[in-house]
Amino acid sequence: MLDIKFTEAKTLKEKPADETKLGFGKIFTDYMFVMNYDKGQGWHDPRIEPYHPFEIAPGCVVLHYAQEVFEGLKAYRTKENVIQLFRPDCNAERMQDSCERLCIPKVPKDDFIQAVKALVEVEKDWVPHSEGASLYIRPFVFASMEQLGVHASTSYIFCIILSPSGAYYSTGLAPVRIYVEDEYIRSAPGLTGFAKCGGNYAASIKSGELAEELGYSQVLWLDGVEHKYVEEVGSMNIFFKIDGKIYTAPCVGTVLPGVTRRSIIELCRDWGYEVIEEKIAIADIMKAGHEGRLEEVFGSGTAAVVSPVKELKYMDDTIIIGDGNIGSFTQRLYDTMTGMQWGKIRDAKGWIVPVCQG
Ligand code: COI
């Protein structure tokens, strides 16, 4: 159990007046959680203090070699004013797996969950009240030692910041257009694809910017060896409903094991759908699209929730999915996931973790 020290802020920020205009990850709350690691001492000095910039050395490892991992989860406000989390244990576990890959000392699972709950409770007034908005929680660990040799740091900072946020895409639940990246890759076997580390996202920015210039929301990555099989989208995992069956890429090291992804797979199986977690070629998806067998495509992620896809562009081929509107299956998943998260439907899965009364 952490003994978390609290330092009170001298002044508090104005809360956003219009929750419909929050956007994603633009505003930060009054406090943050911080804990240090030093070799020989372990994790120490857990504290909640006013949100402030870090003072780090220009020679700090993270600035040069990106030794860093992060997580993303959300706090939701129910109609009864309960503030709750969705499967924080999965985020705690995944962060440990990411730490292991990046040679970062693991934050104990219970400490991760305790720190998230403690900070959310302090900042409960920041959890939005309006439909579809929530408090995005961003835990991260970075290497803080000054050193230019390429070696693991011996000191780290674990921090959690909070950002009241609306939909990840500016279009809200409106279906997005996706560009299939056939040149650059995000990962390959043996690399860091399964870890949630900043480096994966840094390498993805170029393709994302190019896709945006062409009017697409994000890119769909293909496997790094053959450039043939679909893996994931910029900020979400991806699912295809073909001939009544649900397909998604397997999490075999190159794909991020999304918490929303695994929850959706469980829900689909509970509902009696066959879910196939196997390699699926982009050529087969495009073919199914042209033959009218590709019923729905959607992305999943903490930030994106369940996000319908209306168009896929692969080289000089384009397919429009369904009639371009959100499909009924995607809508059902979105309603079920958000229903549980916002406490509108019963949590039969035991996924919800209440934090406090809001
Ligand atoms: C999340 O869904 O929490 C993510 O981390 C995606 C992010 C890169 C926006």
Image: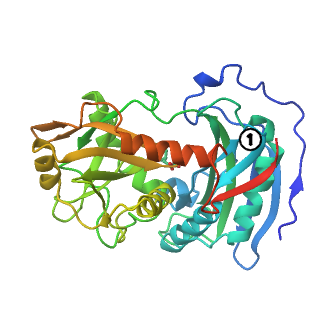
Residue 222 placement (x, y as % from top left): 23, 55
Q: Quadrant of residue 273?
A: bottom left
Q: Quadrant of residue 326?
A: top left
Which residue is disc 1 drawn over?
52
Residue occupying image coordinates x 23% and y 51%? 184
Residue 156 placement (x, y as % from top left): 65, 64
- Report the side of 323 relative to 25 (left or right): left
Specify the amino acid type for callout 1: His
Residue 23 placement (x, y as % from top left): 55, 29
Residue occupying image coordinates x 33% and y 35%? 209
Residue occupying image coordinates x 28% and y 47%? 220
- Report the side of 251 relative to 154 (left or right): left
Residue occupying image coordinates x 61% and y 34%? 133
Work out whether residue 303 can be spotted: no
Q: Quadrant of the N terminus?
A: bottom right
| Residue 29 vertical position relative to residue 60 in the rendered view, above or below | above
- Mark 1, other Cα within 10 Å: few <14 / some 14–19 / many ≥20: few
Residue 10 placement (x, y as % from top left): 90, 34
Work out whether residue 339 can be spotted: yes
Looking at the rendered structure, the secondary structure element under dot 1 is: loop
Q: Depth check: 36 or 339 in front? A: 339
- What is the image's colouring? rainbow
Residue located farthest toward the bottom when viewing the structure as drawn: 40
Q: Depth check: 272 or 6 in front? A: 272
Q: Quadrant of the C terminus?
A: top right
| Residue 228 vertical position relative to residue 204 in the rendered view, above or below | below
| Residue 331 vertical position relative to residue 98 in the rendered view, above or below | above
